[in-house]
Image (spheres, rainbow, N blue to C red):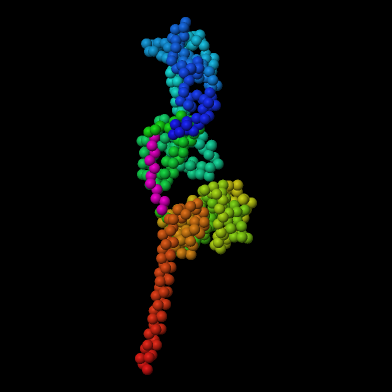
Amino acid sequence: MWGRLQRLFKPLQGVTKHFAPQIWGKSSSKKVKGDMASRKRQPVVGYAGVHFVEVPRAAGYGVEKVYYIRYRKQGKLIEEKVGGQYRDNMTAAKAASIRGVRMEGKEATNEEKRTAVRATKAAEEARYSFNRLWGLFEEAKSTNRTIKDDRIRYNLHIAPAFGGKTIPDLTVLDMDKLRSKLEKDGKAPQTVKHVLTLVKRLLNFALQKGYVEYLPGRLHISMPTVDNSVTESITQEQAKKLLQALDEEQDQNIASLVRLALFTGMRRGALLNLQWEALDFERGFITLRGDVAKKQKTEIIPMNIQSRAVLERLDRTTSPYVFPGKNGDTPRNNFRALLKRVKKKAELPENFRPLHGLRHSFASWLASSGQVSMYELQKLLTHSTPQMTQRYAHLHDDALRKASSVAGALFSQAREREELSEEQPQNGTAKN
């Protein structure tokens, strides 16, 4: 192909060859002095143990000398670069002076300097125990909506395990011991995963912020398998008992929060951070704020009759929150005792998590009703993808099968009536 191009452009050869003679297969035999830097180390006359190499200048033209020194220290031959002619303003005389100082041991060799730097970094890293890293992490992530849960996980599980250790000291055995203890204590796989994930986040935080130079390659964290398809749900009868138990509670404000979870399927975070300005009673909608949402996205859900009745019965205070905390400037968060009481009174399963479980119950009832499509259910639950709603698909399919069976039964009844009407005239004719 190159030969064809040469023939094609042959008429232009006389015009262009003095610009690029090598294009036409004729290389210039004359070399420009200094066009290629000599990489051979050359001794400097008059300075023992000093050599130089010519390399291209950083500016892109010409060359400069890079000086090296050779000497013996404790019987070991050492060769080191001491600097460039222009970039470091180095000369043969300076290089010889440096060589003399290092031979006498008054100045560390390059390798000794690198070793000292590594030792300093290692000492610096040793100062960052896991407890100290957690303090830095907590300060940096103070606005994260999950920081409270992270603090509980760290204080309960990680700090007792290796809070005083540094990252270089951690081993796979430490990780395995932490996981084993969590599992022996009866923690759910999801809880174990949350704790180990927090350890990973702390390690990555330390690396990103430069608190450690690298993470030990041997530090592998094995995560448990979590079956997210398991769905918590209660029956209609259990829901009635739960509502009766809530009616008997003294604190009706927080009891209404639980009722709202049952009637709307809202997430715990959305319920706690619900504000009065997010309630549109005129149009019948509830706005779920994106800054506290799981996916950081603002969503709008309808206000059904039951949830409207719950919200209208609430006493409104000066707090912006529908369910305010003690001082009104933060949402309520201390109601575990109430949840335990009503759970026991309603005789709910031991592993049932009231707020999370009521969200699943809300979804399960709608799916099994056959009156709501999977797309509509996805929107009501504010799921970001249809895959998240698939755990309820079998309930929806069961409802469709039942509806199909009803349709089949109706067709059968219609066919029977048709056959009966056809038989009656024949019977009448026989009598005549």
Q: Is residue 133 above or below residue 283?
A: above
Can residue 242 be seen in the rendering of this structure?
no
Quarter of the picture holding the C terminus? bottom left
Is residue 221 highlighted in magenta?
yes
Q: Could you tell me residue 137's position as x and y percent? A: 50, 36
Residue with the most extreme right position:
318
Quarter of the picture holding the N terminus? top left
Q: Could you tell me residue 125's position as x and y percent? A: 46, 28
Q: Residue at x 50, y 31 (%)?
A: 9
Q: Could you tell me residue 47's position as x and y percent? A: 46, 7
Q: Residue at x 41, y 14 (%)?
A: 78
Magenta: main secondary structure equals loop
Q: Residue at x 38, y 13 (%)?
A: 76
Residue with the most extreme front position:
11
Q: Could you tell me residue 298's position as x and y percent? A: 56, 51
Residue with the most extreme bottom position:
432
Residue 404 image-quadrant placement:
bottom left
Q: How many marks?
A: 0
26 left or right, relative to 328:
left
Is residue 146 highlighted in magenta?
no
Residue with the most extreme top position:
46
14 left or right, relative to 73:
right
State the residue in front, 134 or 242: 134
Can residue 77 be seen in the rendering of this structure?
yes
State the residue in front, 405 or 326: 405
Q: Which residues are magenta?
A: 219-229
Q: Residue at x 45, y 40 (%)?
A: 198
